């Protein structure tokens, strides 16, 4: 029988070079968990879950691995819109977790460069429908998690129109 390799959906079809080992070490020293998303690629996921007192400046550590990064978990941290400036440079991101952070509509406008983004978690943030509309040109968005956000009931219809193929999850 033929063995079919299952490549995760977050792995872009275009290969990338290996990440700089020095950059990976800097992230790991800061407590960031960086792992490959597949044995067949150089793409990576980064998770700030075990990192103490994450600041916006810590996200600058992602810049050297911006091409390899496809999944970022920066939720439950104190990051603000300033951190999104660094995240916006990680243009291969397919998954972005920003739940329970201080990001706002202003910061979301910086994420329009993330053309491959499929999932974004904004649970427990102050974002509103107006801010989320900034992401309407990201045609690959499949899931937008919006529980306990600033999205009012009146904004749902506008979001459904702007994101006809995405799942808008309100919890």
Image (spheres, grey):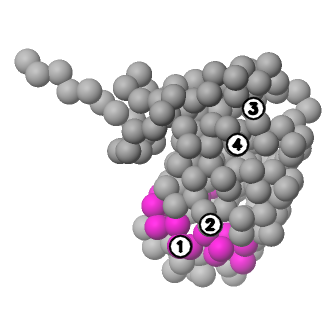
Crowd band around label 2 with a 10 angstrom C-alpha radius: few (<14), some (14–19), many (20+): some
Q: Nearer the viewer, mark 3 or mark 4?
A: 4
Q: Secondary structure at mark 3?
A: loop
| Picture quarter with the N terminus | top left
| Residue carrying label 1 | 137
Quick one: label 4 or label 2, which is nearer the N terminus? 4
Q: Is disc 3 in contact with disc 4, using a CB cutoff of under 8 Å?
A: no
Crowd band around label 1 with a 10 angstrom C-alpha radius: few (<14), some (14–19), many (20+): some
- Taking the spot 54% from the left edge, 38% from the top edge, the residue there is 68
90 drawn magenta: no
Magenta stretch: give its range: 130-145
Is 51 on the left-hand or right-hand side of 160? right
> What is the C-alpha distance between the residues marked 3 and 4?
15 Å
- Taking the spot 52% from the left edge, 61% from the top edge, the residue there is 115
Is 101 on the left-hand or right-hand side of 158? right
Q: Secondary structure at mark 2?
A: helix
Quick one: label 3 or label 4, which is nearer the N terminus? 3
Q: Nearer the viewer, mark 4 or mark 2?
A: 4
Crowd band around label 3 with a 10 angstrom C-alpha radius: few (<14), some (14–19), many (20+): many
| Residue carrying label 3 | 48
Residue 77 quadrant: top right
> What is the C-alpha distance between the residues marked 4 and 2?
17 Å
| Residue carrying label 2 | 112
Q: Secondary structure at mark 1?
A: loop
Q: Is disc 4 in contact with disc 2, using a CB cutoff of under 8 Å?
A: no
């Amino acid at each position: 029988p033929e063995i079919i390799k299952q490549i995760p959906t977050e792995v872009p079809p275009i290969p990338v070079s290996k990440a700089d080992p020095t950059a990976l070490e800097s992230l790991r020293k800061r407590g960031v968990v960086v792992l490959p998303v597949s044995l067949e690629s150089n793409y990576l996921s980064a998770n700030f879950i075990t990192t103490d007192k994450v600041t916006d400046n810590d996200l600058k550590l992602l810049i050297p691995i911006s091409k390899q990064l496809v999944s970022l978990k920066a939720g439950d941290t104190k990051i603000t819109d300033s951190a999104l400036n660094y995240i916006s440079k990680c243009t291969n991101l397919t998954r972005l977790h920003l739940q329970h952070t201080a990001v706002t509509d202003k910061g979301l406008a910086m994420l329009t460069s993330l053309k491959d983004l499929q999932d974004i978690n904004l649970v427990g943030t102050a974002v509103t429908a107006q801010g989320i509309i900034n992401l309407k040109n990201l045609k690959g968005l499949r899931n937008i998690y919006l529980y306990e956000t600033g999205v009012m009931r009146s904004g749902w219809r506008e979001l459904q129109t702007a994101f006809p193929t995405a799942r808008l999850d309100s919890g």
